[in-house]
């Protein structure tokens, strides 16, 4: 029942994304790009292996992409806050399309360096851009639910794309493309069309995003305000049924303290490093220990994505019952326990493989759900008109996590795989250590936040009760205003 209720709420919010005039185009752009990117996700590591790249070289490519992301993420955030979403999303989608095409055509490491930089400048920021845009149009009290719905939507699209890889590969084979490397290149390059679809959408239907930017700081005419008010809908409407069902209201939001912000950012950094490391090196670990190839890995990714999506969809309900930081703490401890699956190496048997698969998939689900958990905590510490810069800062921190995983984590993995590290060898060391650090940091965040909350008086100005739902507003002149949500029939 709880899972069904969570999915029903998520579906109502996703429907809201596509029905709101100012949200439809950004969400459609990132949705189509995600579908195209997930189609070739199972083959990237194997494509690199076919080009004779080593684990450190693969890590270096990821680091270059992370540098591209970090270079532009603050600029994207500023552009979103000051000039609207149009140009930021347009540039990001264009760079992503060119990067996918360049990677599909790359003949070696040097060519992949340029492709990775383009992908970092573009695709590395696209999801964060739209996430920040949604957050800036969302009620504080419901921001976690909206971020969860957004991530759930992308997860469903990831599942769809990954599930299409095997039939797409079979189709290429049936059409006479028998060379494995050529099929890899076609699968990767197809993503270009998905990204350029987003560019076309912006040209055709993105005028409202330009108006959003132009209206910023200038105000709107009375007629425009009246028209926008009539079109306004509350995102809280999709969740009102939960309030009526007896779910306890949220506790008041405590004022942010520097230590809490530092811990949230450190948790995001470690979480991103762990996720990047797992996504990049899990195929290499499986090939080394179990001899599994791209087909088996794509099926594992599909199962993992299904669990990730369900976990993220259920996250708002769990958060309402357990509290923000306690939920994050439980997820971090679960991730640390799941990372022990990388120690299940010998003997190579069905039982060992089953234990490894279950634990690592659970690890990935906890790591995936930590994203909306920590980001909702961080976003509530920024004002409505600063969401772009807030998410830009988080993207910068996540980029540093990617950089660490790709430059340091891949080399530590190689040393562990070759037996140069006395504990957690066979490649398990970086996964276990990073997950353990996440559990420690988020536990400190939870217990420290609980202590500070108990010492601080309640502030009516920061109260996050369900009765104060803020609106997803079509009017950017009202962005950031603490407007009471109202039903529009």
Image (spheres, rainbow, N blue to C red):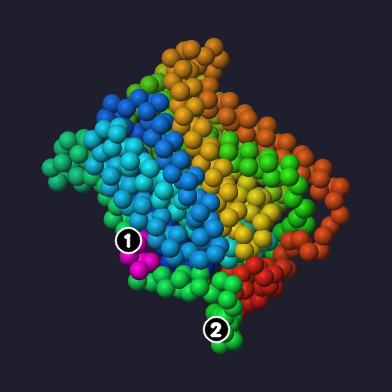
Q: Earlier in the sequence, mark 2 or mark 1?
A: 1
Q: In the displayed structure, would residue 132 be above or below residue 371?
A: below
Q: Which residues are magenta?
A: 197-203
**Could you tell me residue 123's position as x and y percent?**
41, 50
Q: Residue at x 57, y 29 (%)?
A: 434
Circle 1 residue: 197
- Res 230 seen here: no
Circle 2 residue: 224
Q: Is residue 314 left or right of residue 304?
A: right
Q: Residue at x 33, y 42 (%)?
A: 115
Locate the C terminus and report the quarter of the image it occupies: bottom right
Q: Magenta segment: does it hold 199?
A: yes
Direction bottom: furthest residue = 223
Q: Is residue 483 left or right of residue 448?
A: left
Q: Nearer the viewer, residue 295 or 288?
A: 288
- What is the number of callouts on the image? 2
**Could you tell me residue 425's position as x and y percent?**
50, 16
On the image, which quarter does residue 247 sit in? bottom right
Q: In the displayed structure, would residue 374 be above or below residue 89?
A: above
On the image, which quarter does residue 113 sit in? top left
Locate the N terminus and report the quarter of the image it occupies: bottom right
Q: Secondary structure at mark 2?
A: helix
**Could you tell me residue 467's position as x and y percent?**
73, 68
Decide: few, some or many residues near mark 1? Use Cα within 10 Å; few <14, some 14-19, many ≥20. Answer: some
Q: Are discs 2 and 1 less than 8 Å apart at CB?
A: no
Q: Is residue 314 left or right of residue 122?
A: right
- Magenta-drawn stretch, dominant element (helix, strand or loop): helix
């Amino acid at each position: 029942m709880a899972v069904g209720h969570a999915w029903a709420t998520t579906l109502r919010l996703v429907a809201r994304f596509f029905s709101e005039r100012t949200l439809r185009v950004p969400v459609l752009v990132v949705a189509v790009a995600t579908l195209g990117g997930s189609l070739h996700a199972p083959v990237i590591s194997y494509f690199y292996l076919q080009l004779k790249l080593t684990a450190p070289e693969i890590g270096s490519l990821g680091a270059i992409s992370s540098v591209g992301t970090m270079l532009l993420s603050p600029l994207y955030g500023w552009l979103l806050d000051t000039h609207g979403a149009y140009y930021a999303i347009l540039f990001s989608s264009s760079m992503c399309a060119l990067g996918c095409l360049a990677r599909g055509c790359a003949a070696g490491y040097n060519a992949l360096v340029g492709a990775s930089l383009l992908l970092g400048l573009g695709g590395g920021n696209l999801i964060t851009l739209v996430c920040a845009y949604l957050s800036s149009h969302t009620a504080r009290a419901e921001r976690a639910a909206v971020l969860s719905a957004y991530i759930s939507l992308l997860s469903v699209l990831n599942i769809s794309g990954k599930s299409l890889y095997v039939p797409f590969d079979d189709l290429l084979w049936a059409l006479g493309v028998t060379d494995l490397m050529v099929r890899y290149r076609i699968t990767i390059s197809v993503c270009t069309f998905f990204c350029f679809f987003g560019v076309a959408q912006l040209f055709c239907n993105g005028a409202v995003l330009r108006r959003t930017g132009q209206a910023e700081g200038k105000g709107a005419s009375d007629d425009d305000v009246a028209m926008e008010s009539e079109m306004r809908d509350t995102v809280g409407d999709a969740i009102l049924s939960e309030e009526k069902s007896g779910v306890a209201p949220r506790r008041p939001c405590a004022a942010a303290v520097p230590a809490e912000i530092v811990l949230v950012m450190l948790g995001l950094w470690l979480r991103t490093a762990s996720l990047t490391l797992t996504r990049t090196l899990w195929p290499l670990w499986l090939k080394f220990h179990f001899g599994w190839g791209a087909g088996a890995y794509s099926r594992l990714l599909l199962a993992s994505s299904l669990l990730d999506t369900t976990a993220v969809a259920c996250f708002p309900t769990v958060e309402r019952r357990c509290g923000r930081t306690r939920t994050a703490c439980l997820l971090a401890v679960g991730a640390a326990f799941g990372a022990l699956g990388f120690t299940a190496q010998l003997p190579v048997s069905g039982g060992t493989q089953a234990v490894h698969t279950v634990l690592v998939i659970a690890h990935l689900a906890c790591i995936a759900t930590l994203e909306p958990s920590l980001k909702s905590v961080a976003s509530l510490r920024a004002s409505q008109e600063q969401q772009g810069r807030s998410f830009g800062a988080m993207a910068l921190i996540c980029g540093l996590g990617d950089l660490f995983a790709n430059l340091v984590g891949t080399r530590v993995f190689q040393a562990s795989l070759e037996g140069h590290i006395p504990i957690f060898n066979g490649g398990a060391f970086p996964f276990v250590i990073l997950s353990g650090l996440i559990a420690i940091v988020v536990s400190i965040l939870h217990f420290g936040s609980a202590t500070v909350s108990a010492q601080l008086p309640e502030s009516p100005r920061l109260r996050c009760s369900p009765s104060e739902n803020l609106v997803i507003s079509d009017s950017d002149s009202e962005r950031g205003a603490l407007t009471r949500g109202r039903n529009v029939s």
